[in-house]
Image (cartoon, rainbow, N blue to C red):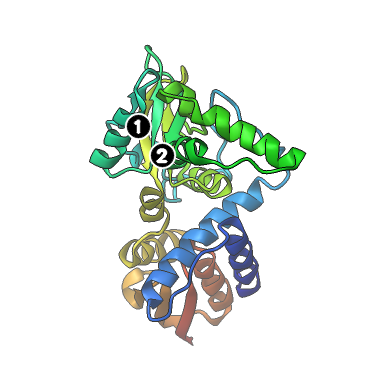
Amino acid sequence: MSGLERDSVERQARKVVPGFGWRPGEENRQDLMLRYLSAVATASAARADEQPTRPSRPKEPRPLLDEDKSAPATPRVREVMSVPAVSVPGETAFLEIVRTLSREHLGAVPVVDADDRVIGVVSESDLLAKAAAQVAVPHPGPIRRLREHRLYEKGRGETAATLMTSPAITVAPGTTVADAAWLAARSRLKRLPVVDHKDRLVGVVSRIDLVRALVRDDTKIREEIETRIIRQDFLLDPDAFEVTVENGVVSVRGEVDGSLIPELLESIEEIDDVVEVSEHLTAH
C-alpha cells in the first residue's frame, strides 16, 4: 500500500468508527488501533458498491481477493470466536437478564429460542430503556410523542423476548475477520453473535478478538517478508538480508540487484500491517 493510499485508508478508518479517542502518551496503542481501523476501512471500501442489507440468515461471504497458496491464510471468525457463547432464552425475566450481564461482565447477550436460534440481542441499553420509561415525563410535539411511545412500549417488556433488539446482526463462522470487523464498526457493536446456516448460536466474537486477529505481531510480518517476498517472489536468499520490524515499521538491509530494489520495497509496503519501510539496500 502506498503512502498516499494509506493516508486515504486512515481517513476512511476514522469515519468508520467515529468518536475514537486518541489519548497522548499511548503511541503503541494508537498504532495498534490505527492498523486495526485501516483493515476495517479496507474491508469497507471493498463493500462500497454493495447495498446495505440486514439478512436474517448470514451467507458465507466471498473472499475480497483471490487467495493463492503462497499468501498467508485469511483469518476467519471461527478461528477467533469465543465458545460457548453466553445467551438467554426469550422467556428470561428482566432481573435475571440484569444478573446475567453483571455475572458475565457483558454489555449484551444474544436471545435464543427453544432450538437455540438467535432471535435478537438484549443489551444494557434495552434495560435502561425500560427503567427510563418508568420515570419518563411526557413532552409536547408529535415527534417527541412518537419517540416516547416507542420508549413506553419498550418499557412494558418484562422478558428478554419483549426487551430485545431484533433482528440480531450476526456473522457466520466462515466470515473473514476483516468483514466481521467492518460489520461491527458499521453497526457500532462490541460483540457479534456467530450463527450456523440454521441461525443457531455457535459462538460470539468481540471487538478485541477482531483486533488481535487483524493486527499481526512484528514477528509474523518479518516471516512473511523473508518467506513469501524475498524467497518465493524474488527467489533471493533471506539470509543475505537483515529484516527487522518494530510496531509495523520495517527496516531492510542487504545487497541486491539495483533493478529489483523499487519492486522489492513496493511489495513490502503492500503487506497488511506494515506502517512504514526504512530501506538500507545496496545495489550491486
Picture residue at 37% right of the left edge, 73% below the top: 28
Left-right relation of 170 to 47: left
Residue at 47% from the left image edge and 25% from the top image edge: 157
Label 2 crowding class (10 Å Cα cut-off): few <14, some 14-19, many 20+?
A: many
First in sequence: mark 2 or mark 1?
2
Instruction: Check disc 2 and report its element: helix, strand or loop.
Output: helix
- The image position of residue 128, as x and y in percent, is 45, 41
Please, what secondary structure does the residue beneath circle 1 have?
A: strand
Q: Position of residue 233 (x, y in %)?
A: 48, 60
Q: Residue furthest left?
A: 103
Residue furthest to the right in view is 142
Q: Which of the pair 139/229 is nearer the observer?
A: 139
Give left or right: position of 100 versus 273: left
- Distance between the alpha carbons at the discs numbered 2 and 1: 9 Å
What is the quadrant of the N terminus in the image?
Answer: bottom right
Q: What number is the disc on residue 77? A: 2
Residue drawn at (41%, 59%) of the image: 215
For the point 34% across and 76% down, which residue is it? 244
Rendered image: mark on residue 203: 1
Where 223 sits versus 160, above or below? below
**How many other residues sit within 10 Å of disc 1, few (<14), some (14-19) or many (≥20)?**
many
Observer-nearest of 159 and 252: 159
Q: Residue furthest top?
A: 114
Please state which amino acid type lies under the numbered disc 1.
Gly
Q: Nearer the viewer, residue 163 or 193?
A: 163
| Rendered location of residue 74, percent (x, y) | 45, 45
The amino acid on which the numbered mark 2 sits, given as a three-letter code, is Val
Q: Is residue 64 visible?
A: yes
Question: Do the numbered discs 2 and 1 sit on residues whose CB atoms are within 8 Å?
Answer: yes
